[in-house]
Amino acid sequence: MSEFTVGDDHFLLDGRPVRLLSGALHYFRVHEEQWGHRLAMLAAMGLNCVETYVPWNLHEEREGAYRDVGALGRFLDAVREAGLWAIVRPGPYICAEWENGGLPVWVTGRFGRRVRTRDAGYRAAVERWFRELLPQVVEREIGRGGPVILVQAENEYGSYGSDAVYLGWLAGLLRECGVSVPLFTSDGPEDHMLTGGSVPGLPATANFGSGAREAFEVLRRHQPRGPLMCMEFWCGWFDHWGAEPVVRDPGEAAEALREVLECGASVNIYMAHGGTNFAGWAGANRGGPVQDGVFQPTVTSYDYDAPVDEYGRATEKFHLFRKVLEAYAEGPLPPLPPEPKGLAGPPVRVGLDGWAGLDDVLEALGDPEGPSGPEDLEGMEGLKDLERPGGAEGPYGAQELGGAEGSSGSVWAESGVAPTFEELGVGRGLVRYRVAVPGPRIPYPLTAAGLRDRAVVYVDGVRAGVLSEESPTLPEPVAGPAEVELWVESLGRVNYGPRLGEPKGITGGVLHERQYLHGVRARGLRLGAFEEAGTVAGVPFGPVPEGAGSTGLFRGTFTVGAGPVDHAGLRLPGWTRGFVWVNGFCLGRYWSVGPQETLYVPGPVLREGPNELWVLELEGAGEAWVELGPGAPARSGTPRPEPERPVRSAAS
């Protein structure tokens, strides 16, 4: 068996110097049946290694309920079959433009600012997760005949904190769990990030998109010896809803890559192939110089303007990178695999002939109206252990409960204040809040204080407006008495910066003028409920309402002919905001604000013959059809370099 080690100036394979030419490809953003093709594309570009993160929240969305942890192992087996090495970055925090930076909602909801620190409760949760996950890695290390050569400790920690005790403990935990390959850290090439994120004795790497010589000079000040590596060479960038797409000039990116290699360094191209944020797992950012400003949700596509695009096709950037990399290859590069083929023929309209209103969908698939007590909070069992003011019986205090034990209905069915998504156990999805405006009273402004992120509001059953964090007050005042409903959606949790882990929902209360409205009822609709076998069959579908503007769950079918189909693209002209499923597989969020207009449909999701389509529209449907075609063309846009530091010194 081989041995991979860290030398004074190079990485060493059985004592021989090697340069890592790696590319990022996240197994959780690519359909499993397409892993082989995408890995072959990386090899054809001239790479000898692949890097992947591991999202904790995908595999343990609810505490103790592990889901397909073996997917990582199967991916690493595919890496080995492709003849590549592997770098694994298990977090527990990963950023990655992924929901909550990969941390489960039950973790950030319970521990708050104590995540990513030496806090004993947080460390215990991490240790349980790592002991479940890491056998997938350890069994596939290079010393056991597998592809894994490096494992990262935490992720860009210097952009967040300075808890050296926590970092040292985490590195020790990786060793206790059996990881024997070299560990490393990665941070932005700035003094405060490297001092905050490095671990004595572990090689440090740097993340940047240009200026390799300057970046490595900074790294050398902190690490005089050891191999140089850019662990994230940002060859493109991600997009936000409502913003212009970011596209990096291929020639400029290729020259920046050449500079990294001319420094004698190893490199990991981030991203080599970006893939897709399926099922509402896209994260979000905050604007401003320290990421504490305007909320910026990330789109469903994670194309990243990568050399291998979202559809698995080689771009101009791919061919330019290939020319740069082949000069460092140990032999001829393998040929490209066949280019994926889209659905044949011109786009077709798929009619939608079934519909159920949001209330009916919530009744069929929703959680109970308010958790029945602290012990039943989904994944939030630890709330009952939080400090309670005045020795109150529950996490909010008995005076806030809407009823008494033994009374009809749930003791939590009506709350003194609006519970957050975290308190309701809702990660991806939406919550319906209901509250009464007492009366009689004259009209006053109605505000959802601390709203995260977007709410469609109804007053006495009539739509009254759409609210957001920036515009939390209805345009018209509300008189009392009145019944108010607010359908609030999380558009993705922050994955980077000091706002990591911030709660979702109505976090500051519902205000009528300056008066808080109490007696709030809340009911969650988790996206995960649509994934549970047979649940949608219980939704009472009826005819589609005439005209546009409805909300609810729409259903239709379409037929796919014989022959292989690698992908398709789905567009929703005239529709506003929601989610789409094909044969029970969630393609992700659509939103008319753009810039993304087409949702990627993986070929393995499609079936020869009839296929079922669901569209959950939350704001206002278009006409009762969607468009299915071969997919988006090769990406275009105005070339822009990656954002300048210090807008964001660490991107993923």
Image: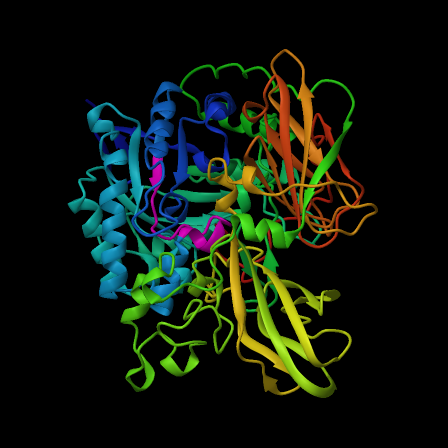
- Residue 82: name its quadrant: top left
Q: What range of the chain is rendered magenta?
A: 87-102
Which one is nearer the viewer's eye here, 246 or 64? 64
Q: Is residue 316 left or right of residue 575?
A: left
Q: Is residue 191 shown to the viewer in this render? A: no
Q: Is residue 286 left or right of residue 60?
A: right
Q: Is residue 89 left or right of residue 437?
A: left
Image: 651 above or below 150: below
Image location (x, y in percent) of residue 251: 64, 36
Image: 511 above or below 365: below
Q: What residue lies at 42% left-to-right and 61% top-to-bottom?
A: 159
- Residue 328: name its quadrant: top left
Image location (x, y in percent) of residue 9: 29, 40
Which one is nearer the viewer's eye here, 43 or 628? 628
Which one is nearer the viewer's eye here, 264 or 492? 492
Q: Is residue 76 shown to the viewer in this render? A: yes
Report the residue that reaches farthest toward the top. Answer: 563
Residue 63 counted in the magenta span: no
Q: How is the image coloured?
A: rainbow
Quarter that holds the N terminus:
top left
Image location (x, y in percent) of residue 19: 36, 31
Q: What residue lies at 64% left-to-right and 33% top-to-bottom?
A: 613
Residue 97 counted in the magenta span: yes
Image: 507 above or below 196: below
